[in-house]
């Protein structure tokens, strides 16, 4: 069973087949945003050049459609991130779990995004990518370095009675091995209204 078929069946079981969403794909350069987007779109693993300009893709999984915005991750590209927050349903923030030297930089960018008023209610899926590479950070290590140790809401459906609490969770993945990110998207899909 392909990831698309599996994800489609899961979305149908949640009653999400008719939903449409706008999702931002954010993170530092070389974290895997474009690779993930291509994998979700057509299940192809292709080596990409660094994203030069913001791009958007329509992705359909079953009858669920979402428009994904890959804004790039180079420092110059991060300047436009704040211009693209209007009417966004969710955000996926990718971190290269192997590139530990950039964790502080990634934390600064994530903190800035989490403090944005326009994103205050949007679910945030943090994906620690590249766990297939030896010595990549563990989930606990990544949570610690991103300052998320006690801020996440749980990897299962959590009834957020307090409407001021934003769904926020960390999932570890390997896009090239097609593992981990499916669970993250399942989690996130529960919170998209």
Image (cartoon, rainbow, N blue to C red):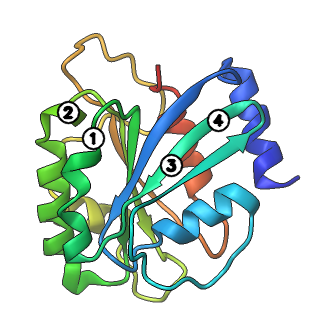
The reply to whether the C-beta atoms of the residues labelled 4 and 2 are less than 8 Å apart is: no
Vertical placement of 190 versus 155: above or below?
Answer: above
Mark 4 / mark 2, whichever is N-terminal: 4
Q: Residues within 10 Å of mark 1 (few under 14, many from 20)?
A: many
Per the model, the C-alpha gap separating discs 4 and 3 is 10 Å
Per the model, the C-alpha gap separating discs 1 and 4 is 19 Å
Vertical placement of 77 versus 26: above or below?
Answer: below
Mark 2 / mark 3, whichever is N-terminal: 3
Residue furthest right as drawn? 1
Q: Which label is found at residue 146?
A: none
Pointer 1 residue: 85
Q: Residues within 10 Å of mark 3 (few under 14, many from 20)?
A: many
Q: Which label is found at residue 65?
A: 4
Pointer 2 residue: 118
Mark 1 / mark 4, whichever is N-terminal: 4
Per the model, the C-alpha gap separating discs 1 and 3 is 12 Å
* SS at badge 4: strand
* SS at badge 3: strand
Q: Residue at x 50, y 85 (%)?
A: 49
Q: Position of residue 26 (x, y in %)?
A: 35, 59
Q: Residue at x 79, y 33 (%)?
A: 9
Q: Residue at x 18, y 44 (%)?
A: 114
Q: Residues within 10 Å of mark 4 (few under 14, many from 20)?
A: some
Left or right of 116 on screen, residue 28 = right
Q: Which label is found at residue 68?
A: 3
């Amino acid at each position: 069973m392909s990831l698309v078929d599996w994800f489609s069946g899961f979305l149908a079981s949640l009653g999400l087949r008719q939903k449409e969403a706008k999702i931002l794909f954010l993170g530092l350069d070389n974290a895997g945003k474009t690779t993930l987007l291509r994998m979700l779109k057509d299940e192809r693993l292709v080596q990409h050049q660094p994203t030069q300009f913001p791009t958007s893709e329509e992705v359909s999984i079953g009858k669920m459609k979402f428009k994904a915005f890959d804004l790039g991750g180079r420092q110059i590209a991060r300047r436009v991130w704040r211009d693209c927050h209007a009417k966004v349903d969710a955000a996926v923030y990718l971190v290269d779990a192997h590139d530990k030297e950039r964790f502080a930089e990634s934390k600064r960018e994530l903190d800035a995004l989490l403090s944005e008023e326009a994103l205050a209610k949007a679910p945030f899926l943090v994906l620690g990518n590249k766990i297939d590479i030896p010595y990549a950070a563990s989930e606990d290590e990544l949570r610690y370095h991103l300052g998320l140790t006690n801020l996440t809401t749980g990897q299962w459906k959590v009834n957020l009675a307090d409407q001021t609490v934003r769904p926020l969770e960390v999932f570890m993945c390997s896009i090239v091995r097609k593992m981990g990110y499916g669970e993250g998207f399942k989690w996130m899909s529960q919170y998209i209204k």
